[in-house]
Each structure stands twice: as C-alpha cells, then as structure tokens.
Image: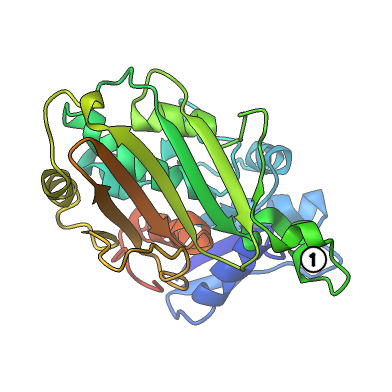
C-alpha cells in the first residue's frame, strides 16, 4: 500500500484529490490534524514518509515543501505554477507524446499543468510537432472559466449574497497580458513567441473553454476543418481522456465535461478561418484529475483509477 500525502488538502484542488483517493484500498492517505497542518516539522515528516506527495499550495509554499524533502524515493506532484517550466521537472501531460508519458512514469518530480495551459497546449503542440503550424506563428488565445478557479477568496466573493453586481458578467483579467500560465503555454506548446492570452472568469462554478482562432494562411499548407480534426484524432489516438469532434449545435458550452477527467478538442470554422477549441473541467483535467492521472502513471498503475 502506497502512502500519499496531500500538502494543502484544505484547498479546492486538494479536497477534490482527497475525495477521489479516500475510497481506494491501495492507498493510505496521510493526514495532519488542524493544529499541525501548518507545522513545518510535521509537514516535513509527512512529506518524507510519503511514497507520493501532492502539493496543492501557492508557489512559494510549494518551493518550500520541495526543499523539505530529503527522501529520494518520494514522488512529488506539484499542482502550483512553481515548477512548470523548470528544467529538472517533468511536465505532467502524458497525452502529448509517448516521451512525455515515459518521463512521467520514471520521474520523481512532476509538474501538474495549469488548467488554461492544458487546453492551449493540447491544441497547439500537435500542430507544431507535426510540422503543420510554424513555431513562430503569432497566436491569440481567448478562454472562459468558472469562478472555482479563482481560489477560496474568489469563490467566497462569487457566492456571497451581498456580492458586487460586476460579478454577474464575464470579467476579463490579466490585463497586463502576463497571466501566470503564459510561460508554460509558450514552452510546452513549442511556440517561439508568447501567445496573447485573454482569460475571462464567469458566473458559473466550473468548466472552461480555451479558444484559438487562426487564419488558414497561418498553416504551412492548406488544411480544412475535417483534415485538421483528423490530424488531432491521429495525434491523440489511444489517449483515453482526449476526445476530438466538431460541434454541430451552433454553441459550445464550457461546463459539459464537469466531474470528468476528459479534455475535448473541437474544430470549427471555414475555408479561410479556423476555430480550435479545447473544453475541460478546470477542476478535473485542469487540476485534480490530472494530478491523480500522473500519480497513477508514476506508480505504474492504470491511469484511469479513481477517474
């Protein structure tokens, strides 16, 4: 039986992970009492005693937690932004390639992808990897997410009975075009230029869509909507949690994959302009689900256990 310690269990992501893992009989969840939850010495003991440590912490706290780990056998899965572009850490997106999956299976340091970044990279990486889109393409990405991604304070603000009426509408943020996911979006997609990223937080709890519109002329050769869908289907063939399709209803809702670990790629548009969309649960494949999937792979288990 493997020991798993979730450092930061009280947060949204940590709670989701705990709820999925507590039902398993092959894992012993290590917990600290409320009085010891912030004790450095108690956390250090738990981190070093664990077979897997999952960090659901702010960036600085995640770096501190890693510095406390002396056990070379402890697998660390960091759900923060702290190590997603770090050269010594493996990026935890197994569907991108067999090489990504193998690195996760053999690594002790795994950086869990960001939610927006998961959608963006899922769209762009296959196009650059397969030589269809030039790496120096200037890319714009628009995305919407439920307010659960805003953290505890954000959730409290949205669910308050006396909330500001501004929260009734979609709200554009990261106005300096410096969202914390942008560095990993650039690095792990293979782009040479940072994408222009405009995210919105909206008045619903969870679920997101990540959208990249492209002129057909941006591609190295002519490609239709159907051909592009076939390219994605071939790239993600055999990937249990990635689906490829085309929306026919005329609308793409952001919350239809909530409660799952699936990521869906939708290709729409026309001969001159193409619209690429990734849909996922920001708390599932965008956070807790991805962490559990990475843990399963690192432990040599079926990746879908608990998912």
Residue 142, image x and y in percent?
Answer: 48, 42
For the point 22% across and 25% down, the residue is: 217
**Tag 1 secondary structure:** helix
The residue shown at (59%, 39%) is 81
Is residue 186 or residue 67 the one in the foreground?
A: 186
Is disc 1 surrounded by few (<14), some (14 to 19) or many (20+) residues within 10 Å?
some
256 is higher (above) or lower (below) than 215: below
Q: Is 71 located above or below residue 30 in the figure?
A: above
Residue 91 coordinates in the image, percent (x, y): 41, 39
Among the 4 quarters of the image, the one containing residue 297: bottom left
Q: Which residue is mark 1?
A: 156
Give residue 37's position: percent from left, percent from top.
Answer: 79, 61
- For the question of whether residue 58 can be seen, the reply is yes
Instruction: Indicate left or right for 88 with 170 as reference.
Output: left
Determine whether 232 is above or below 20 in the image: above
Name the image quarter holding the N terminus: bottom left
With 170 as the anchor, is 42 left or right in this view? right
Q: Nearer the viewer, residue 245 or 9?
A: 245
* Residue 46 shown left or right of residue 252 in the figure: right
**Residue at point 25% right, 50% down?**
267
| Among the 4 quarters of the image, the one containing residue 25 | bottom left
225 or 44: nearer the eye?
225
In the displayed structure, would residue 22 be above or below residue 227? below
Point out the image quarter for the C terminus: bottom left
């Amino acid at each position: 039986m493997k020991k798993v310690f979730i450092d930061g269990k009280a947060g949204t992501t940590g709670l989701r992970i705990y709820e999925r893992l507590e039902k398993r009989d092959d894992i012993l969840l290590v917990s600290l009492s409320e009085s010891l939850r912030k004790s450095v010495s108690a956390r250090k003991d738990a981190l070093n005693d664990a077979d897997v440590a999952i960090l659901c912490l702010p960036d600085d706290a995640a770096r501190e937690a890693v510095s406390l780990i002396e056990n070379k056998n402890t697998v660390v899965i960091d759900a923060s932004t702290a190590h997603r572009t770090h050269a010594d850490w493996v990026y935890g997106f197994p569907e991108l390639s067999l090489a990504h999956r193998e690195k996760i299976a053999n690594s002790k340091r795994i950086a869990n992808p960001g939610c927006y970044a998961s959608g963006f990279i899922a769209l762009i990486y296959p196009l650059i990897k397969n030589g269809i889109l030039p790496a120096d393409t200037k890319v714009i990405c628009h995305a919407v997410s439920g307010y659960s991604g805003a953290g505890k304070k954000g959730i409290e603000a949205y669910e308050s009975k006396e909330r500001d009426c501004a929260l009734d509408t979609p709200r554009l943020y990261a106005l300096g075009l410096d969202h914390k996911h942008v560095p990993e979006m650039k690095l792990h997609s293979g782009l040479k230029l940072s994408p222009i990223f405009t995210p919105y937080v909206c008045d619903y709890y969870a679920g997101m869509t990540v959208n990249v519109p492209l002129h057909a002329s941006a591609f190295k050769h002519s490609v239709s909507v159907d051909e592009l869908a076939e390219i994605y289907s071939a790239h993600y063939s055999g990937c249990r949690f990635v689906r490829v399709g085309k929306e026919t209803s005329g609308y793409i809702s952001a919350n239809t994959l909530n409660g799952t670990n699936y990521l869906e790629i939708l290709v729409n548009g026309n001969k001159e302009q193409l619209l690429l969309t990734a849909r996922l649960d920001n708390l599932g494949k965008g956070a807790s689900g991805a962490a559990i999937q990475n843990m399963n792979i690192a432990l040599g288990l079926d990746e879908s256990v608990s998912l």
